[in-house]
Image: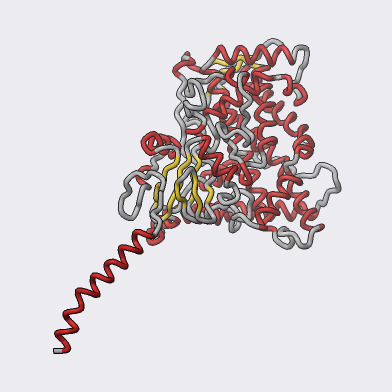
Amino acid sequence: MDVLQNLSILPLFSVIFFIIFLHKWWSTPQKNLPPSPRKLPIIGNLHQLGQYPHLSLHSLSKHYGPLMLLHFGRVPILVVSSADAACEIMKNQDLIFSNRPKLSIQDRLTYGSKDVAFSPYGNYWREARSICVLQLLSNKRVQYYRHVREQETSIMIEKIRQMGSSSLVVNLSDMFVSVSNDIVCRVALGRKYGEDGKFKKFLGGYVELLGEYSVGDYIPWLGWIDWVRGLNGKVKKVAKLFDEFLDVVIEEHRKQRKRDVDLDFVDILLDFQRENEGSFLADDDDAIKANILDMFAAGSDTTPSVLEWTMAKLIKNPKTLKVLQDEVREIAKGKEEIIEDDLDKMHYLKAVIKENLRLHSPLPTLVPRQSTQDTKVLGYDVAASTQVMINAWAIARDPSSWKNPDEFQSERFFDTNIEFRGFNFELIPFGAGRRGCPGIAFAMAIDELALAKLVHKFNFRLPNGEREEDLDMSEASGITVHRKLPLLVVATQHAC
């Protein structure tokens, strides 16, 4: 009888538990997540990334809006594709989104993320960036190295002149890589290392690997795929090569200690290490190596990319090239060499470079960020540890910000105060906020001087009778977007 009574009250308990469940469900605030395309089991939206992520993400944003949520395996990815959303991330909530995700390949290449670019947000990063900004890349330090830029760009011009006098085809893409490497080597290490081509080759391998992603970062149990495809082996080899190389460089600098004359970045960092016992650099040569590698990755890869795309755009738009040549040649009239003091007068040259940066951001989706806490962005809920990809390429082609956004129109910058230094979110090729690139002034000094000297000294045409309008403008894949094909020209010396 007792058993029957107990059984009879079971439905009553079931109803009570069901009511409690409904109450909790209704009382729990429902997340307002950003729009999201459908994802596949296990891989999520990885299959939608494609060979050119900035293009794939731009296409998706047309359907899902300027703020959308993807999933790469188990990792949530917030994709930003408008100036307003970028401002919210990099200005209004910059502190919340100032962390970096730990990416295994980049972590191994930068000595456990001891560099400025990939280190997590915190005391270590703040000190590293402070040293970078105040000791290595301040305006005073950038001006200190102007003689290096002027000398090396003049050497590049002489190489092109000799080839042009023999009617040889000039590979401008290679020229830009060489001049950038030589400048960065002299500034960072004290001398050039690229004469035999080996340094250029393994530096190229290093930068290429920085743009790779490990499957294990997003789907841990598939991490073995990186071993099978040889990726882990490449990372180990390149990291070992650079480590051995930088060990030798640092030891040479310790033996040949300089005093305030012709100091390079290694000298400056070693002096700081000796004079600041409590610094993160104290007794840690790996930190010095990691931050020197940042200079190479940025200076030796993004700078050639900007130059080759700018020259390609000019050759494809001969009227723009003619206007630029007229400006530069008028300012340089009667001079054998252009120097950096002349650049401030070249307003059209600056507009040309801005327009190229708008259309060809060196890092189209910038370096990823990561949220440190739950927050709201433009009314949407964003969870802590969400990675953020900011599509600078898409933002710079947004028709709500730019008239005729796909056209190369340098003159547009005479009608706007928009700059690329991180204060105007319609144009952020170097990022913005705390994690913006600290080397903008250094990079632009090379780009402007090299471009001015080129258009001052030479007229250009494409080889083999190729027409300007048929110039292939395809992109190569990678963290830094270069041209798929090298830029080949015939350079004829202009009679100054």
Vertical placement of 66 versus 169: above or below? below
Residue 134: quarter of image:
top right
Q: Can residue 467 be seen by looking at this rendering?
A: yes
Quadrant of residue 171 in the image?
Answer: top right
Measured as percent of width and height from the top left, residue 85 is found at: 51, 39
Examine the rendered structure and indicate whether residue 135 appears above or below residue 412. below
Give whichever of 356, 447 is nearer the camera.
Answer: 356
Relative to 335, 227 lies left or right: left
| Colouring used for the render | secondary structure
**Where residue 154 sits: x, y (%)?**
71, 26
Farthest bottom residue in view: 1
Q: Nearer the viewer, residue 482 or 133?
A: 133
Classify the position of the C terminus by image quarter.
top right
Front in this rendered view, residue 348 or 294: 348
Q: Is residue 226 above or below residue 57?
A: below
User: For the point 57% across and 15% down, which residue is it?
Assistant: 320
Q: Position of residue 182 (x, y in %)?
A: 68, 37
Residue 466 appears in view = no
Asked if residue 470 lies left or right of residue 309, the reply is left
Q: Is residue 449 above or below residue 43?
A: above
Residue 3 lies, in percent from the top left, at 16, 87
Q: Residue at 49% across / 28% down in the picture? A: 397
| Left/right of residue 172 with respect to residue 36 in the rendered view | right
